[in-house]
Structure formats: structure tokens, C-alpha cells
Amino acid sequence: MKFVFIDKEKAFFPIAPMCRLLGVTRQGYYSYAKRPPPDRRPADVALLGPLEGSLQALAQRLGAPARVRHQAWLEHIRATYAKHREEWGELARQGQMSQFDKLAKLVGEVGARGEPNHPVTLTLPSEQEILISRVFDAPPERVFRAHVDPKALADWWGPREYVNTVDRWEPRKGGAWRIAQRAPDSTEHPFRGVFQEVVPSKRLTWTFEYERLPGHVLTETMRFEPEPGGRTKLTVHAVFPSQEDRDGMLASGMEWGMREGYERLDDLLDRGA
């Protein structure tokens, strides 16, 4: 039933985070998607109906798929489960949910993991800009170092299920960089750019380009500002050549990838990096 849910919602929400949160692999989902459609039991329909309606209403309100936010998806899972908790709990007690991996289990796992200590704030100042801010429990010197040390960067940059290879790294004005991300299905996603400004512990500016879509180059400036308690406020200002390019980046799932990457950076900083 997890695959049924993912199949129904893939037009509105990225497949990768749904698979991760539901505890299944993307390969497993794609294998399922090639099979003939399975029959649904009445209890399964009763379970999925309210959840699907809630998520689809959310998607329409936010202008899905381009602007659906991963966090909003989680919040609606929780809210929908809370609303139907007694009804679904009774189905479970009657043994009518054998084909549906309890949504309660998913919500419990998400709740136990909790939200990040410092959430990501994303705004759209203009048609060609994205502005992101995030606080880290470490001073600017350490957070900056984790952005310019290629070994540290490879440990946290992007989603947890991706593996980074830093092919080129010259953190100085005019220096080039290239990072290749390998997805679980072995697909490689290469990125490249040029450093425009490197001010230790304060500011980092580079160009950013996805090699599979050459010519669509954005400029990204990262500012590292000290906060009380030895913390750092990181502000990322991205400027795109067009609104189409900016919206394409949003639709690609960059926000959930950035959220996961920053959670990985939290872990790295906690280990003393």
C-alpha cells in the first residue's frame, strides 16, 4: 500500500522523499510501477481516501507541483492522521489493515525524529531570486570551513541517499569547482561553477550550473553571520537568469535536498568538524 500511495501522489510530491519517509526504496517503487494495477481492498480505500483528498487540496492551494513544500506535506500527513486516528485505529484492531503499513507508524517515526532544531526559511524576493536562511550551532569559522573543505563538503552536501565526489575544488577568486552526485539508482548528477569571492568566515560567492542543462547559470552568495551563543546564521542568496530557471530549480526538489543537507551538516558539526 505504500507504493499505491506514492503512485497516487507522485504528480504532486517528489518521489524520493516519499519513498524515504515511507521506508521503501525508489527501485522498489519503480519495479511496482511496471506491474499491472493491483486491486484495492475496501479498508484500504477507506484509509487512503481522506489522506489523498487532504494532500490534493493542499497541492492545489500551493500551485503544485512546482511550489509544493516537503514540510507542508509532512504537516498534512500528521494533521490528517490526527483527524482520522480513531477510525483507522478501529480498522487496525479489526485486522482490516493487513495490506496497509500503518500510517500511525510513519507519523510516530516522524514525530520521534522531530523537526530540525533550526528550520530552513525560504522566500522569493523577486521573480529571479531565492533567499534562504538557516542557523547552525557552531561559530562562523567552523560553518565556513565545512563549506570550503572538499572532504567535509562531500560528507553533507545534498540528500542523505546521494554520494558526492568532488572532482575539482579551487576555493579562490576565479577558481573552478565540480561536484558529481550519484543517486541510489547510480544516475550521476554533475554540477560545476567558478568561485567569484572567498572571504574567510564571512562570505562565499560562486556560479552554479547543472552540467546536463548547460547555459543555465545562477550566482549564489553565502553569508556567514555570528549569532549569540556561538551560533551562525547562514544566508544564501541565489540569482537566476530568468524566472523559468528559478521555478525549475524549485520544482527539482532543491528545498528538501537542502534541508537534508543542512541536517547532515548539523551532524558533522556535532562531531566536531
Image: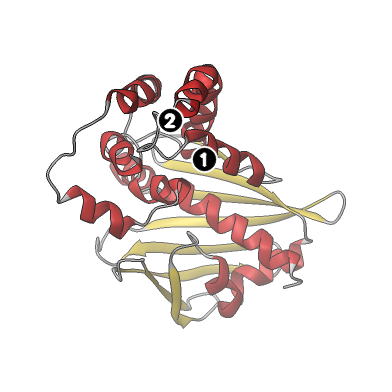
Report x, y in % for residue 146. Answer: 64, 70
Q: Which mark is residue 106?
A: 1
Q: Nearer the viewer, residue 151 or 197?
A: 151
Give the mark toward the camera: 2 or 1: 2
Q: Are marks 2 and 1 in contact (CB under 8 Å)?
A: no
At x 56%, y 51%, the residue is 236
Q: Nearer the viewer, residue 186 or 214?
A: 186
Q: Amino acid at mark 1?
A: Leu
Which residue is labeled 2 in the image? Answer: 95
At x 68%, y 72%, the residue is 145
Residue furthest toward the left?
36
Q: Amino acid at mark 2?
A: Gly
Report x, y in % for residue 237. Answer: 53, 49
Report x, y in % for residue 250. Answer: 38, 43
47 above or below 118? above
Q: Judge left or right: residue 249 versus residue 135.
A: left
